Image (cartoon, rainbow, N blue to C red):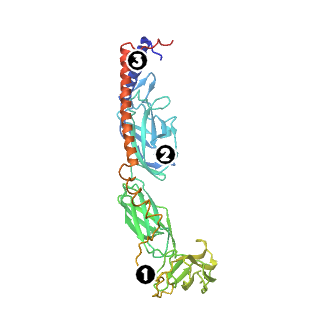
Amino acid sequence: MTLLHPFRRAAAIAAACAVLALGVVALVASQSQPARAASVGEFTMTPGSGRLSDAQGVGGSIEIPGACPDFTLEDLNFTSYLSLYVVKADGSEATALRGISNQAPYDGATSGVSLAAADNPGIVVNSLSSIITGDGTYELRVRCVDNYDQSPPTDAWVPGDPYWSQKITVTGDDWVVGEGAKATSVALISDPVTAEPKEEVTFTATVTPTDAPGTVTFLEGEKSLGEAAVAGGKAEFKTEDLAGGVHNVVARFTPTDATKFGASESTPARVDVQSARVEMLDAASGERLTNNPELKRGQTVKLIVRRCQPSTTFAMSMQRNDAEFPSAKSDANGEVTWAELTVPDDAVEGQSGWDLTPSCSSDGSGSDVDAVAFTVPAPSDESPSGDPSGEPTDEPSDEPTDEPTDEPTGDTGGTTGGESTTGGGDSTSGGVSTSGGTSPSGGLASTGSQIALFSGIGAVVLTAAGIAFVRYGRRNGLLTFGEPRA
């Protein structure tokens, strides 16, 4: 083991303390820097509106309510030029006008400044349409910049990063001074997207921002289907009155206060209303059956298949059965109907189906239909399983006997006599039992726990004794170590 010389050890400790002290000083200094200021005032703009696509999006004039920082370093100063910045949606700044110099120096209580290029030699103009890319409210900032590269002063020279601000609201290519109304958006979904006539369809509109109060009107073209108030950013409308065909519905949001929130409209939500491709009904009750229903033997159903080839004759058969069924012809709309199809009494239990020949070819709205599935249940068992005829018999199969017998009737090698596995003698369920008395598993578990406990205690005692012995030996010179290696 290598030991440090006492002098080197002291020097290392002193160096570490110095590094730590410098870190503390740096931390305190960083925390004690003056906070970066927000706007030190609001500048005014004349005129108060414009277009993003203009060659100079912000023109006219501005008035700043204060003086630029009174800071000079040799011939460097911040009273000779101004620059105008736009704060983008991500918080970064982009320069709109750089090098405004009209009416400089800006060292008075107020300064009225023309933004016209002719009044500002060397001004750099950037298009607002390349900076602002969406509707909403944007902040403009006017800063004092130096007279060389037109950069704002660093915080070391002018603490607080002072600037004057103003806000504009953009709608399309137009902007106006002020925050204006917040832009909104609305999204619309329908459930289901494919429905049958008289089936309920739910339209859900989601308005952003969610705190925008108002109503949503649900429109198909210019026809209003209904409207609903917005609650928690959502509006819901339900209807069963959509006729057959394709419907394109939009949601139009109308704010309660148009000065705070703007109106908006969703893209269309499509709903296709059409009758089911296949319908199977119970012929007796007229009840519509579910998909792949259970049909009992002798049950009669009505089957309708739609959107097939018009004026086509379709043969009918049943899977796993040789019964004959009538054919049917589709009408001009491609709808074919079997008024009565009866499940034969000898139908095989399990999965089955009505088979169409030829297949009902799709008109482009879905897959072809060549079979309509159903399930045949197991036959009911109403007679005894012994005699299929169900007739009782009085003749016993064996003659009874009244004479008792002492002879064992069971298995003499198993449960009676000798060494029984269930009774006396050396029985595994009596006498010395593996589940009672002294259990092998219980004894071993208990013994193992005791051994582990005493082993742990012994290890702790031996470790403590070893540590005490080493310390005693070193203090009394019983243990020594050689000189450190060079």
Q: Secondary structure at mark 3?
A: helix
Q: Amino acid at mark 3?
A: Ile
Q: Secondary structure at mark 2?
A: loop
- Residue bearing mark 2: 57
Question: Is the residue 451 above or below the residue 239 in the image?
Answer: above
- Residue bearing mark 1: 401
Dot 2 or dot 3, earlier in sequence? 3
Q: Nearer the viewer, mark 2 or mark 3?
A: 3
Q: In terms of depth relative to the viewer, which is nearer, 37 or 401?
A: 401
User: Disc 2 to disc 1, how far (Cα)?
Assistant: 121 Å
Q: Amino acid at mark 2?
A: Gly
Q: Is residue 248 left or right of residue 64?
A: right
Q: In terms of depth relative to the viewer, which is nearer, 123 or 298?
A: 298
Q: Secondary structure at mark 1?
A: loop
- Residue bearing mark 3: 13
Dot 2 or dot 1, earlier in sequence? 2
Crowding near the residue tagged with mark 3, few <14, some 14–19, many ≥20 C-alpha atoms within 10 Å = few
Q: Residue 263: horizontal and vertical position, in percent? A: 42, 59
Q: Residue, x 40% and y 17% (percent of image)?
A: 13
Dot 3 or dot 1, earlier in sequence? 3
User: Disc 3 to disc 1, how far (Cα)?
Assistant: 111 Å
User: Disc 2 to disc 3, how far (Cα)?
Assistant: 64 Å
Q: Residue 334: horizontal and vertical position, in percent? A: 59, 80
Crowding near the residue tagged with mark 1, few <14, some 14–19, many ≥20 C-alpha atoms within 10 Å = few
Q: Amino acid at mark 1?
A: Thr
